[in-house]
Image (tube, coloured by chain):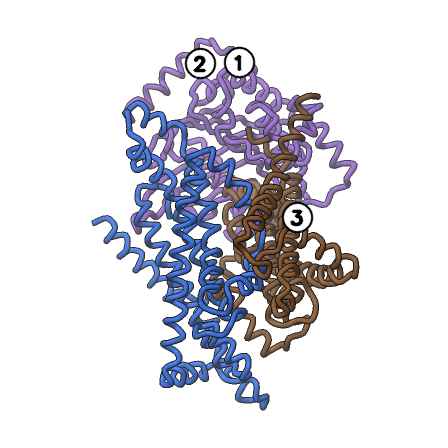
Amino acid sequence: MFGIIRKIGTVALRLLAPPLLLIAVWEALCRSGRFPDAVLVPPEQVYLTFIGLVQDGELWDNLKASGSRVLIGFAIGGGAGLVTGIALGLSRTLERYLGLSFTVLRQVPFIAWGPLLIIVMGIGEGFKIAIIANAAFFPMALNTLDGVRNVPRNYRDVAAIFQFSRWSLIRRLIVPASLPFILTGLRLALSRSWMMVVGAELFASTIGIGHMMDWAREMFQIDVVMVGVLLTGIVGFLLDQSLRLIEARFSTWKPRAA
Amino acid sequence: MASRFSILSKFHAVARQLAQQRGLLVILALLLAWEAAVRLSDNPALVPFSRVFAAAADAYREGDLVNNYLASLARVAVGFAAGAAAGLVLGALLGVFRIVDLVLGPLLTALRQIPIFGLVPLLGLWFGIGEQAKIVLIALAAFYPVLLNTHEGFRGVPRNYREVATILMFSRPQLLRRVLVPCALPSILTGLKHGLSFAWIAVVAAELFMAAAPGLGNILQAGREQFRIDTVLLGIVLIGGTGALMNYGVTLLEQRALRWRPAFV
Amino acid sequence: MHSVVKLADAKRSPKWTDSQTESGSDRRFSQHASDLVLRQVAKAYRIDGKRLPVLEDINLTVEPGQFVTIVGASGCGKSTLLRLISGLERDFDGEILVSGRNVTGPSLNRGLIFQDHRLFPWLNVEDNVALAFESRRIDPADKRRIIQEHLKLVGLTGFEKAFPYQLSGGMAQRAAIARALVNEPEILLLDEPLGAVDALTRLYLQNELQRIWTQKGVTMIMVTHDIDEALFLGDRVVVLQSRPGRVRRIIDVDLPHPRDREDRQIARLKKEILADLAGEH
């Protein structure tokens, strides 16, 4: 009983300490009086701005726009990455034909595709989803490929002995055996997607968190910019944590690490 | 001797792979198909891939290409050096001294959650439209991977090795030089590799999203504004190629520094 | 010599029989064990362009329902031999015939048990055993019943939902045995199945294997480096010599099962085998 309370306490401390400390340092910097208001606004001012943005619904609209872009782009890019990773990992022929193209394309930082995609697709939703999907694709494909390659040969013998079909092989062996890698890929892909949605909105947009920040920067509204910065951090953190929970949930067959 | 041999055999392996690469054929076929498609269609926005070389030649003649390229390289060098140095020092302190970890750890964790592009508007406001904002963005991009991995590396030094150091009566500097740094090295190098590739992404982002200045991002931006696919592709090829080269360089460094690790491939 | 006689009446099948016909559904799950003939089987690996013979000139005939053990020092190619018979490795010289048909790939008719249990860590015992049915169409109720029967056969009733990490080495190996048996293979290949369990469990599992063999009437071919084990279980003991692996000799053990481990004849045969293998080091 006591142990549980202590455990909850430790977890709460670990979760709360970073933001509390950040706010404390931030407040202290503001009170030191060395930074003008145009550069650093105190936490409570940012909080009031945040409340204001929530109340007039602007924040929610922006968040929703960014969120749906991330989800769609991540789903497309992550799904394609998963399939590509498994296919390249299983088929030597495919690897031989497409491996090089994959490696070459991978070298281009995802942000650099932006201008090209804009020329080809315009600056609408399609472009934003494409660039997010592209950012999600490679981490997912690479980690899946790693996972598939790391499936122990021994297990493949078992599959051969029981004459698994290709589909059985993927469903019963390849996917579960590489699940830890796949989940890591998923987590990376999601955080890249979230990062990229802000980037996509900086390129061009009329709505979204990135747009809100960019517009506020032009208006010199540093409080709104800081709300945006904090929000992107918090959402990113929550997305990452939720995938970590899923990760923990899916590894029940592993003995708990001591 | 041994390393020379391995470089030679690696060269052979690469050559053999290239010879067998059907992948190369696929790429060539795609480029040819593109070229053919463009010549057959009459959409002015589409340009043949061969135009990329012409664009490169044009840009080179006008002197922009070299200037833009050098500007980006200089930015990544300065930003990465600053960010990586800070990451190394802080990561080591965090890993070695528990008290530093307790005080600074949470703060760094909180700040780390902010996606790098999210900082672009804030840094723009703070540091203005000059070079400073760009360098800070790049340094921050490099900082976190280096910090995290260095921290991890130092924290993960096996107790067994520390005990050996105690038995041998190592001084603190000796402990650092003979035990901690070598043990943390694989992780540190991984951090540097990720840091460099993030710094390179940040260079492009800075040049695209922050105030205009010479750089490879500028080539992309100019191409976009003039609807010139060839110019944009030139930028992509240069950015991708340079990124790959930098990555390859760090990997070579890694292999050399970690020769003692049997599992290293 | 035995094998020569056998060969004469072994029906020669066309060389390119595919595994589908060989394991055709009519005889795939029949209760009658098949006979196995190895004729001049040889296997070599290529390492850096150099040919490294692993097995040479292996001739062996196994009657339906026999328990054959293969002993030899480590590195004599015992495991490779089983991999060839199982069909996991297809690149070899000579002929391997099951009921007169060439082995061209794995078949549910030939089960294989590995030294490491190779249960999939993310599946519980029941689901691991069910893997054996993956390539068959089978009524779910039958499937459940067969799995239950076999878990009972190996003494794992009550552990259906346990994950491999929760089992001891011996229990995991028993689950692996159940998995290999549910398809009612006619030939069961065992690659040092007891190599990784402790000495006491090992003796116990030897008795269990013998019981299962008697109950099932399945042909068993077991590779081991433990001469006691080979003599305790085998109707015939094949002694392999190393580098390259060749049949040193084949010993018929004419003792009824279950055997007395202290039997005089076994002690004598053990001495002979030890003498055979002693020259190798």
Which residue, given by chain and number where applicable, does mark 3 sit on?
A238
Q: Nearer the viewer, residue A237 or A12?
A: A12
Q: Residue at x 39, y 40 (%)?
A: B184
Question: Residue B219, can we see it?
Answer: yes
Q: Position of residue B106 (x, y in %)?
A: 55, 41
| Residue at disc 2, secondary structure | helix
Question: Which amino acid does the dot numbered 1 rest on?
Answer: Arg
Quadrant position of the C terminus of chain C in the picture: top left
Which residue, given by chain and number where applicable, does mark 2 sit on?
C266
Check chain identity for marks 2 and 1: say if they share one. Answer: yes
Chain letter behind tag 3: A
Name, please, the residue furthest toward the bottom. B42
Chain drawn in blue = B
Residue C190 in the figure: left or right of residue A68 = left
Q: CA distance from mark 2 to mark 1?
A: 9 Å
Q: CA distance from mark 3 to mark 1?
A: 66 Å
Chain drawn in purple = C
| Residue at disc 1, secondary structure | loop
Chain drawn in brown = A
Question: Which amino acid does the dot numbered 2 rest on?
Answer: Ile
Which residue, given by chain and number where applicable, does mark 1 sit on?
C259
